Image (cartoon, grey):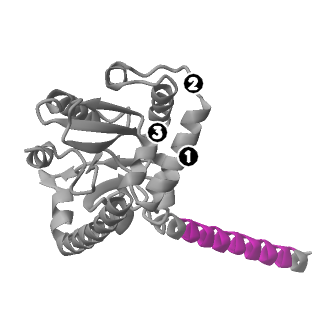
């Protein structure tokens, strides 16, 4: 009996020792697992960012680093640096401050050479694309007559321009108002091409303008309404436009080109337009 009790005590002691060892092992494993948490930057890529917000196609990440509990992410967007601070399922755009220091500013200086390199490369690429775009449109300028929605200006004019516009574009509206004001004085005829590139609202407004044969006044005064507008001539017009402007790599407005391709104004540069109209 003593022998049996001794054997039983040894077995129980061994089991308890095993349980203690197992507990200690699991505790250590748990501690190391908790300390070895996932890198907060590991899930941050362009797909993850686009899940939360819209970004231009050319946007790309050039640097990521952990900053506290966030991932400081530097994007280059249209040649400009954009800092984002990303959590597990969100991001914040703007500057980060800590202990009266702008953390973002320090990061900007640390990455200034890379930012400068990326900015230079972007502008060189854009310059080459602009040259190709101007060359294509100058060679094919007469084809723009197929896309004109309405005309305005002087009856007895000396020159004509094509004005490519979007109904939701505020810069376009300002330039149209300016051209409407000076066209008589400058003896200028303006051929407006409605090219909806700013989303579904502008597309519906463009259909409305074409389907209802708007002139300059109706076009400028018409606001957005939710009623859908569809007509065959607008569908055919915008389909042909899209194919043509895709070849020209034109995906923005406003855009003005003189009827013979003698000069071009990209964007909202009213001062440059004034120079050409002298």
Horizontal side of residue 195 vs 260, given as left or right:
right
Residue 82's spot in the image, x, y percent? 28, 56
Residue pointed to by mark 3: 199
Can residue 13 be found in the magenta stretch? yes
Q: Which mark is residue 174?
A: none
Q: Which mark is residue 228?
A: 2
Q: Are marks 3 and 2 in contact (CB under 8 Å)?
A: no
Q: CA distance from mark 1 to mark 2?
A: 18 Å
Q: 78 or 132: which is nearer to us?
A: 132
Query: On the image, which quarter does residue 115 sit in?
Result: bottom left
Q: Give me the residue at 35% from left, 63% from top.
A: 139
Q: Give me the residue at 13% from left, 54% from top.
A: 101
Q: Secondary structure at mark 3?
A: loop
Q: How many marks?
A: 3
Q: Give me the residue at 52% from left, 21% from top.
A: 226
10 Å crowding of disc 3: few (<14), some (14-19), many (20+): few
User: Sequence-wise, which precedes: disc 3 or disc 2?
Assistant: 3
For the magenta stretch, what is the residue range? 5-30
Q: CA distance from mark 1 to mark 3?
A: 15 Å
Quarter that holds the C terminus: top left
Q: Residue furthest right?
A: 1
Residue 140's spot in the image, x, y percent? 39, 59
Disc 1 versus disc 2: nearer the observer? 1
Q: Main secondary structure of the magenta part?
A: helix
Residue 123's spot in the image, x, y percent? 24, 67
Position of residue 112 relative to residue 43, above or below, is below
Q: 197 or 8: which is nearer to us?
A: 197
Q: CA distance from mark 3 to mark 2?
A: 14 Å
């Amino acid at each position: 009996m003593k022998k049996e009790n001794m054997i039983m005590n040894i077995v129980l002691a061994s089991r308890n020792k095993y349980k203690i060892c197992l507990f200690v092992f699991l505790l250590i494993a748990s501690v190391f697992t908790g300390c070895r948490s996932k890198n907060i930057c590991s899930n941050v890529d362009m797909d993850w960012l686009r899940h939360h917000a819209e970004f231009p196609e050319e946007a790309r990440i050039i640097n990521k680093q952990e900053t506290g509990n966030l991932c400081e992410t530097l994007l280059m967007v249209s040649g400009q640096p954009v800092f984002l601070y990303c959590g597990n399922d969100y991001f914040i755009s703007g500057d980060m401050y800590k202990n009266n220091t702008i953390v973002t500013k320090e990061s900007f200086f640390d990455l200034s050479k890379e930012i400068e390199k990326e900015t230079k490369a972007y502008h060189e690429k854009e310059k080459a694309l602009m040259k190709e775009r101007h060359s294509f449109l100058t060679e094919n300028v007469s084809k723009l007559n197929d896309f004109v929605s309405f005309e305005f200006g002087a009856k007895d004019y000396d020159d004509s321009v094509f004005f490519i516009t979007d109904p939701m574009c505020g810069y376009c509206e300002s330039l149209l108002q300016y051209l409407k004001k000076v066209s008589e004085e400058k003896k200028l005829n303006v051929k407006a091409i409605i090219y909806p590139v700013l989303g579904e609202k502008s597309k519906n407004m463009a259909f409305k303008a074409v389907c209802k044969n708007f002139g300059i006044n109706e076009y400028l005064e018409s606001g957005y309404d939710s009623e859908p507008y569809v007509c065959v001539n607008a569908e055919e017009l915008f389909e042909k436009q899209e194919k043509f402007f895709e070849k020209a790599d034109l995906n923005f407005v406003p855009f003005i080109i003189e009827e013979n391709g003698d000069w071009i104004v990209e964007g909202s540069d009213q001062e440059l337009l004034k120079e050409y109209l002298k």
